[in-house]
Amino acid sequence: MAVEHLTIIVPYRDRARHLAVFIPHVCAFFSRAAPNDGAGLDLLIVEQGNRAPFNCGLLRNIGFHLARGTCTQVCFHDVDYLPIWVDYSKPQGLTPLVWYGAERRPLVPGGTMLIEHRSETFFGGAVLIPARDFEAANGYANDYWGWGFEDIDLLARCICSGITIDRRKGTFHPIDHANEGFSADGVPTAAHLTNQRLYQSRWPRSLTRDGIDRAASRMDQDGLSSIRYTVLHRRLVPRPSTDERDIPIALVTVDFSGPTR
């Protein structure tokens, strides 16, 4: 079944080369490979317009806030994952789409040190969720700065909220880039370790609905309901030649306060 309205939200900063590939590829995909996915469809790129550490969860929350009221489901999509064979139709809950393509990625382009992801537990890359479920989980946490853990924090929030967890076996072509969570020789960065400690403090128990301490997780205080941001600039992106569906594409640059910890 086609979705009622799908907004694809892309968190973004300083990846112009990737964005120049991503936009025409996604437009071609939805024009030819998936012409019936997203009866209503638009693409929203949310750019972090400050030099604070990158905050993927906050940018995704801002994107949803900007799209709220028009979308019935959203796909939070990284700019470095190009869909090849993927089902973007209406989801039943939190639905990761990346199965093939993320298994082994170099920590730096051309490097020999790899990071491995288990397809069964990978919640990054591209994730579909109904708008009502995202709101029920209070979105992503805003406190993960720099790299990592906002994805599995969302998983924990959805489990805690009783939201269905699904998975689809999509095939993607990843674009290699420097991993901000590890050095080139595989040593975790300070941001990775800080975010890991934060996640473990908020979700110390196993991810079962009965075993989660909602108060300790701070999911009701830190999330979609607590975002503060300013729109610096908004522009429509010119329609690429690969777009046969006239997909609206907007790039919104936003500013927000940096980390306090």
Image (cartoon, helix red, strand yellow):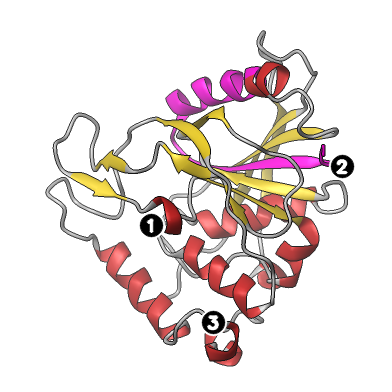
What residue is shown with label 1? 147
Instruction: Specify whether residue 58 is painted magenta.
Output: no
Mark 3 or 2, closer to the camera = 3
**Nearer-the-camera pick, 2 or 19:** 2
| Residue furthest out toward the top | 241
Secondary-structure class at tag 1: loop
Q: CA distance from mark 1 to mark 2?
A: 33 Å
Q: Amino acid at mark 3?
A: Thr
| As drawn, 128 above or below 260 | above
In terms of depth relative to the viewer, which is nearer, 168 or 202?
168
The quadrant holding residue 222 is: bottom right
Image x and y of residue 258, in percent: 48, 63
Q: Is residue 234 above or below residue 211?
A: above
Q: Amino acid at mark 1?
A: Trp
- Mark 1–mark 3 Cα distance, whole angstroms, equals 25 Å
Q: Position of residue 172 (x, y in %)?
A: 48, 32
Which residue lies under the disc numbered 3?
208
Q: Are marks 1 and 3 in contact (CB under 8 Å)?
A: no
